[in-house]
Amino acid sequence: MSKLTYFPDNRQVDAIPGNTILQTSLNNDIPHTHVCGGNARCTTCRVLVLEGLHNCSTPRNKKEQRLADRLHFNPTIRLACQTRVWGDVKIRRLVMDEEDIALVDQTRRDAVVGFVGEEKQLAIMFADIRNFTSFAEKQLPYDVIHLLNRYFHLMGSVIERHNGCIDNYMGDGLLAIFESDIPGAAAQNAVKAGLEMLVTMERMQPYLKQNYGQHLQISIGIHCGAVVSGTVGGVDHKNEMIIGDAVNFASRIEAANKENDTHMLISEAVYKEVNKVVRCRQSLEVMVKGKQGRHLLFEVTGADSWPK
């Protein structure tokens, strides 16, 4: 039987040869954070191998190597969920300082669902009012707040009608998410909502003209993909939020409207779910900030009858 020693606990336990470090921790009731469930989707289980690196599984498996390359791990930093032990090893766990311990203890006490994060497949929409900063500079602050509240109320109602919800507000912008167990439904709902939002904005024009003497337009970007949804914040103030590459990409798609003089762009992933219904004026191959290569986007201008 191999021996696995934990520091700074200075606790030694038996380790079944071939078991992962995480399995050994859990089998011996040693607290070991693994927020993704031990699936190499995060690095919170990582350990520093103090001695016995030659008794750890080498080379790293594909899952671990992917994260090690991305985060530039040195050879002694290993993922406990992926590293198997074949002899005596001494390690130090990641969650050891007072802040991390307090966070984990608070999580256990509160038992907040989603506190540590949950992976979801969502359709993500970003919407933004064009040139709003220059518009707001010419208005009284209270008038700007009133207009934004009116705008968010109208757009929020549209989004809710199509089974979505507003996840966050960012100045004059909003982030909305759509989720469904039915394949393709989330993307379809997001596009339906986006098209209705464009119509709603046009209906606001007489109000804007009469009260502000201005014409405002919105830009919408939609993408679908995997995100991590969880609760983030301090002990007394937590907020739900989603993060991930899909969120960033949706934001970049929305921003691409301004560069291409369009109002609603969707990603290729979304287009695959709605191409039999939507009408597109054009497809664009664009460079997206923060992403390598050129990406195919589609300008959506309308839709025919949606499937029931």
Image: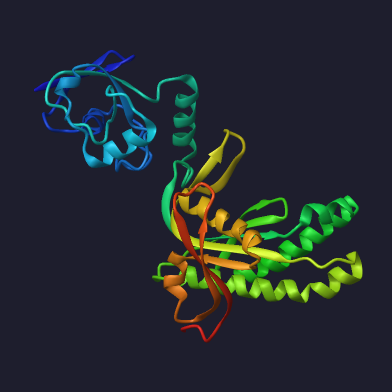
Q: Nearer the viewer, residue 131 or 1?
A: 131
Is residue 122 something one can see in this rendering?
A: no
Residue at far left of view: 1
96 to the left or right of 162: left
Residue 173, x across and y down, in percent:
68, 55
Residue at horizontal 37 percent and vertical 25 percent from the top: 94
225 to the left or right of 178: left
164 to the left or right of 274: right
8 to the left or right of 129: left
Is residue 75 something one can see in this rendering?
A: yes
Residue at horizontal 40 percent and vertical 21 percent from the top: 96
Residue at horizontal 29 percent and vertical 43 percent from the top: 39
Residue 18, x across and y down, in percent:
12, 32
Residue at horizontal 88 percent and vertical 57 percent from the top: 143
Looking at the image, residue 38 lies above or below residue 101: below
Q: Quadrant of the N terminus?
A: top left
Q: Nearer the viewer, residue 34 or 218?
A: 218
